[in-house]
Amino acid sequence: MKVTMETKKRMIEVQNVSFVYPHNNEEENVIALDGIDFHINKGEFVGIIGHNGSGKSTLAKLFNAIIFPTQGNVLVNGFNTKDQEHLWDIRQTAGMVFQNPDNQLVATIVEEDVAFGPENLGVPPQEIRERVNRALATVEMKAYAHQKPHQLSGGQKQRIAIAGILAMEPECIIFDEPTAMLDPSGRREVMGTIKKLNQDKHMTVIHITHFMNEIIDADRIIVLDKGKIVMEGTPEVIFKNVQGLKKIGLDVPQMTELAYELKNEGLDISDNILSIEEMVAALCQ
Ligand code: ADP
Ligand code: MG
């Protein structure tokens, strides 16, 4: 493929992708994704939302070459995920963090766990040590290097799982509902880490969530429903459509909801409100 400026900028390209989970009885095949087309640029923070069963996790697994499109192509850094030759490049380029931290931790000591990925990539021991230190510093867990993962809180475990991915030095991380099993403080810790990776380390982040507040400052939001993209745009554009989101079983950020209700009660208030700060500013006017 000719490498143009456009393709260099692209982290992930999804070209007319469908994915079907086959069933013994063909009539019961599940069409999880149905003709999806979009791309993600390097350095972007993209939120993906959608009701349960809308195809979010299936999409995430396609990015990471865990599964392959039934129709169409997924390109990661220009490599087609169907191209077996580049499978490890792809998995190393696009790391993945899942919902349950307990399922992602493999070793009995934190630093061994973080070292697991680079060890499998054949990174030399001295460099592994450096990568582990850097990754633990990034997620602010250096003080826990010699602890046992099972003694940590949910948010801490999830940050160790993130460090394990960072140690493989990916360009892009896909988070599939990483905060779903955490308490509010764990959720804050993990979101702080994710935002830092994007803003300070310039990593491409794809964040799948059902907590709308987590993506109010995303660059872009993609909304899935029944395996199709039904909306795509900035948080302002997406969350303005309160009724459209409700119709497909989704919420809006708390402050957007409040502004929506106040407006329905006759208050003259902007429908662009996403955060508490914006709400305070609007009410103080
Ligand atoms: P989400 O992550 O948005 O909840 P999923 O991608 O997990 O959605 O699922 C999309 C659709 O595919 C759903 O109808 C789900 O039941 C179905 N599905 C997911 N995984 C499998 C599987 N391993 N086998 C069969 N059907 C599946
Ligand atoms: Mg899912």
Image (cartoon, helix red, strand yellow):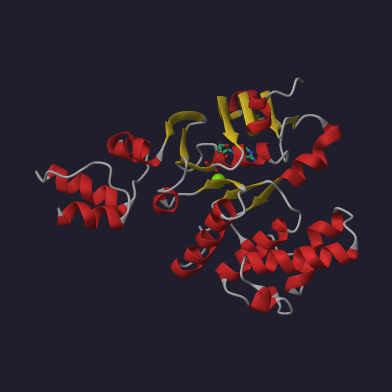
Q: Is residue 232 visible?
A: yes
**Image quadrant in which the N terminus is located:** top right
x and y percentages locating residue 249 in the rendered image: 37, 41
Q: In the figure, residue 230 lies in which quadrant? A: top left
Work out which residue is located at the far front of the displayed protein and give it. 5
Q: Nearer the viewer, residue 139 or 27?
A: 139
Q: Is residue 121 left or right of residue 231?
A: right
> What residue lies at 65% left-to-right and 59% top-to-bottom?
162
Q: Nearer the viewer, residue 221 or 252?
A: 221
Counting every numbered tag in the picture gives 0
Q: Is residue 279 above or below residue 57?
A: below
Q: In the figure, residue 241 lies in which quadrant? A: top left
Q: Is residue 178 visible?
A: no
Q: Nearer the viewer, residue 227 or 262?
A: 262
> What residue lies at 50% left-to-right and 37% top-to-bottom?
54
Q: Is residue 6 left or right of residue 120?
A: left
x and y percentages locating residue 47 in the rendered image: 49, 43
Q: Is residue 221 above or below residue 145?
A: above
Please tell me in which quarter of the rendered image ligand 1 is found.
top right
Q: Is residue 95 above or below residue 234?
A: below
x and y percentages locating residue 30 in the rendered image: 59, 30
x and y percentages locating residue 9 in the rendered image: 64, 32
Q: Nearer the viewer, residue 264 or 269?
A: 269
